[in-house]
Amino acid sequence: MKIAIVGLGYVGLPLGLQFARSGVEVLGVDIDPAKVAALNEGRSYIKSIEPGVIAAAVRGGGFAATTEFERIREVEAVIICVPTPLNKNREPDISYIIDTGEKIAPHLQRETLVALESTTYPGTTDEDLRAVLEEGSGLKAGTDFHLAFSPEREDPANDLSKVELIPKVIGGYTPACLEHAQAVYGKAIKTLVPVSSCRVAEATKLLENIFRSVNIALVNELKLVYAAMGIDIWDVIQAAKTKPFGFMAFYPGPGLGGHCIPIDPFYLTWKAREYSQNTRFIELAGEINTAMPLHVVNRTAEALNARRKAVNGSRVLIVGLAYKPNVDDERESPSYVLMHLLQERGAEVAYYDPFVPVIRPTREHAEWAGIRSVTWDRPTVEKFDAAIIATNHQAVNYQELADWVPCIVDTRNAMAPVNTKAGQVWKA
Ligand SMILES: NC(=O)c1ccc[n+]([C@@H]2O[C@H](COP(=O)([O-])OP(=O)(O)OC[C@H]3O[C@@H](n4cnc5c(N)ncnc54)[C@H](O)[C@@H]3O)[C@@H](O)[C@H]2O)c1
């Protein structure tokens, strides 16, 4: 079997490599020639993927990358893993999916499966994507080609998150589409979870991410309520976690980050309006989570004030630019919001992140592009008046941080096991 994976990012590349490992010939398609060149030379641009794995797949002939969409003709299945961001009005931007649909449609062969993996609102596959595929190919979904939605489930930096072992939800446009999709995915994935439609599969992914967003908001709110009562939320969660049923631990932080949790729930909010439905939990969770960076900045101001310092003119180090520990992904990271708010208040801001040596140019944070992580040594770090731990990477030496910086604002409870001075650490 030969398949194409369109969009070779955090989702598409590991999936493609898993198919290749399972004996399926994989053609990776991306619009970014730099990524295509890197892969064909056996180089990796994702920290969690060893270059050796890519090189072995390329050498063995199981994996090749291209920018040429006409090569879709060669394959039996096309799996689409392109971005689904929000636009500047926080509305779904499915233009990457539509663009991909338009590019593959003219080359689509009869009996081919097209499966969408990008997180999106219910109806994207059987309305929006189907329409462009049918128009561009002259073929009919369910009759001439197969159509399905199968959401990606991934937890970067979690060793248990292995593509082949994560049960995969699949919905087909017709029962035959589902059957076909199961046959394709079954080659590489151990457990398949067939559902009754593309829409159920799309809605499942949204439920999973909304569940996280709402629960993170809950602990973020409780963090503030309990702090006012002199109770530490981290102690509370630690104790609650011992309950063997009916509780799942979520942790507070400086705000949501990443490509999924801050964004995906609003895909549903937007679509729900078409049905005159409100998504109040989603809105409230969004409101609470987006208020967190300001809370952290206010705590930093309090902490500096206690040392007779103003934010204005202080040197503040953000520790951790990535949105979660032990990954190099800084998309949508609340660290950017922290840096922006502090700079607006006159602070001199820098960051340290062992996984993000330099900030890449992006549309969202163009002003920070090219800024480098400070080096981790005493003469550099001790010049800062305060440090904010935004992400608790394991690779950071928190004892050194305590030895070098007089004032630490900790949003992740990273300083709990560290020897610190009285009044040095401010939880936020
Ligand atoms: N990253 C995660 O942990 C994760 C988890 C589950 C679901 N998702 C979802 O998966 C989808 C992809 O996310 P990602 O993190 O892999 O994104 P990404 O930005 O890492 O990768 C997307 C890739 O698609 C390419 N691309 C963009 N437009 C294209 C086009 N028209 N044709 C071909 N290639 C194109 C980009 O060059 C890039 O390589 C999103 O919908 C996301 O919400 C992501």
Image (cartoon, helix red, strand yellow):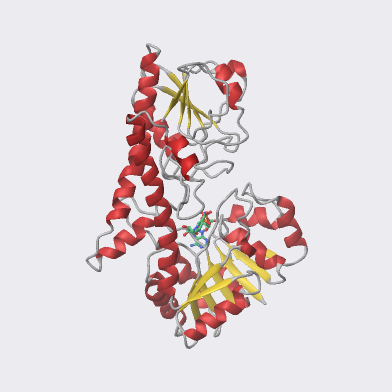
Residue 371 at x, y percent in the picture: 51, 31
On the rendered structure, is 220 left or right of 355? Answer: left
Q: How many marks?
A: 0
On the rendered structure, is 405 left or right of 45? Answer: left
Please, is residue 240 above or below residue 6 in the view?
A: above
Q: Residue at x 45, y 17 (%)?
A: 423
- Asked where in the image residue 303 lies, by quadrant, the reply is top left
Image quarter hosting the N terminus: bottom right
- Asked where in the image residue 366 lies, by quadrant, the reply is top left
Please, is residue 108 above or below residue 46 in the view?
A: below
User: Looking at this view, is 202 or 39 the one in front?
Assistant: 202
Q: Residue at x 58, y 17 (%)?
A: 403
Residue farthest top in this picture: 308
Residue 339 at x, y percent in the picture: 42, 31
Residue 84 at x, y percent in the picture: 43, 58
Residue 170 at x, y percent in the picture: 51, 73
Camera sees residue 145 = no
Please, is residue 217 above or below residue 204 in the view?
A: above
Camera sees residue 259 = yes
On the rendered structure, is 31 left or right of 200? Answer: right
Image quarter hosting the C terminus: top left
Please, is residue 377 above or below residue 99 in the view?
A: above
Q: Residue at x 55, y 84 (%)?
A: 111
User: Looking at this view, is 85 or 164 the one in front?
Assistant: 164
Q: Residue at x 41, y 79 (%)?
A: 135
User: Looking at this view, is 137 or 55 the one in front?
Assistant: 55
